[in-house]
Amino acid sequence: MTAEERGASKLHDPTPQRRKYVIELLYKFMTNQISFAQMTGINQKDLYLLSEVGHVKLKHGRVDEAKRIFDCLVQIDHKNPFYHACLGSIYQKMNKFVDAVYEFSEALKYKKDDVSALVNRGEIYLIHKNFKKAAEDFRAAILLDPLGKNTFANRARSLVIAIKRNLQAQKAVAGKASPAAAVPGLPGAVPAPGGRPALPARGKPMPKGR
């Protein structure tokens, strides 16, 4: 190997400083401190451009193609909450709710104030009658948007109102006189046995921000 070739690849016969740097980098990757993209120095702009392609494919109904793109993105950069939230929305659209909840939870692990992930996950809990967890997610989303400017937080507000009205109507029909226990986060809300609250029409599930 010529001196020029040796200089082009510092991994060949590295200096002690270079060896130490590589070992530390691999250690951080193996201990989940950095992503594959961070370890290899992949350009973040290129990854975001690829995510935009996935977003467009999903908008046009090419769900499987969008899923393949975001599956790759979360493997390459697993610490990016936007990719997890997008993949969660894809699973939600495919009615794979367990996978969707997992991806939304991963997004929230890396970005606790992701309102879209909170509302989408809360809606899945609501559909499956887990009223307590749904209420917690909706409440967290609403508290993150005190001015009422976020589309997803406003959807959470409308869902809370719809739940309360539906449950009040069920209570009136059943002729229950005594007040029922409230679900945490939803004052006065009591799930009727075997019933499902009427929900307003769903909005677009994809997160709008990064």
Image: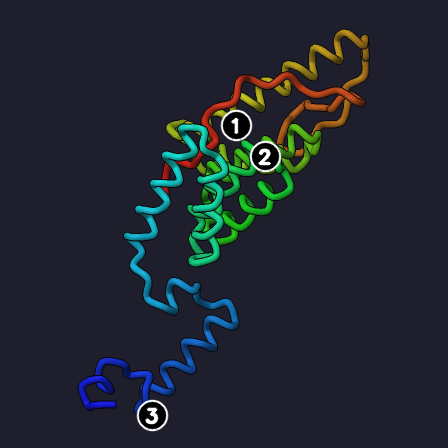
Q: Secondary structure at mark 1?
A: helix
- Residue at numbered disc 1: 156
Residue visible at 43% across and 64% down in the picture: 36
Q: Which quadrant, please, contains the C terminus?
A: top left
Mark 2 belongs to which amino acid? Gly
**In the picture, residue 159 is in which quadrant?**
top right
* Label of residue 68 in the image: none
Circle 3 residue: 16
Query: Can you tell which of label 1 and label 3 is closer to the viewer?
Result: 3
Mark 3 belongs to which amino acid? Answer: Pro
Kind of residue at disc 1: Ala
Instruction: Residue at 64%, 34% (x, y): give it.
Output: 125
Is residue 117 depicted above or below 158 in this figure?
below
Circle 2 packing at 10 Å, graded few (<14), some (14-19), many (20+), is many
Q: Are marks 1 and 3 in contact (CB under 8 Å)?
A: no
Q: Secondary structure at mark 3?
A: helix
Quick one: label 1 or label 3, which is nearer the N terminus? 3
Tell me the tag on residue 122.
2
Going by the image, does 38 lie left or right of 27? Answer: left
- Would residue 175 appear left or right of 50 to someone viewing this image? right
Report crowding for label 3: few under 14, some 14 to 19, many 20 or more residues within 10 A (C-alpha): few
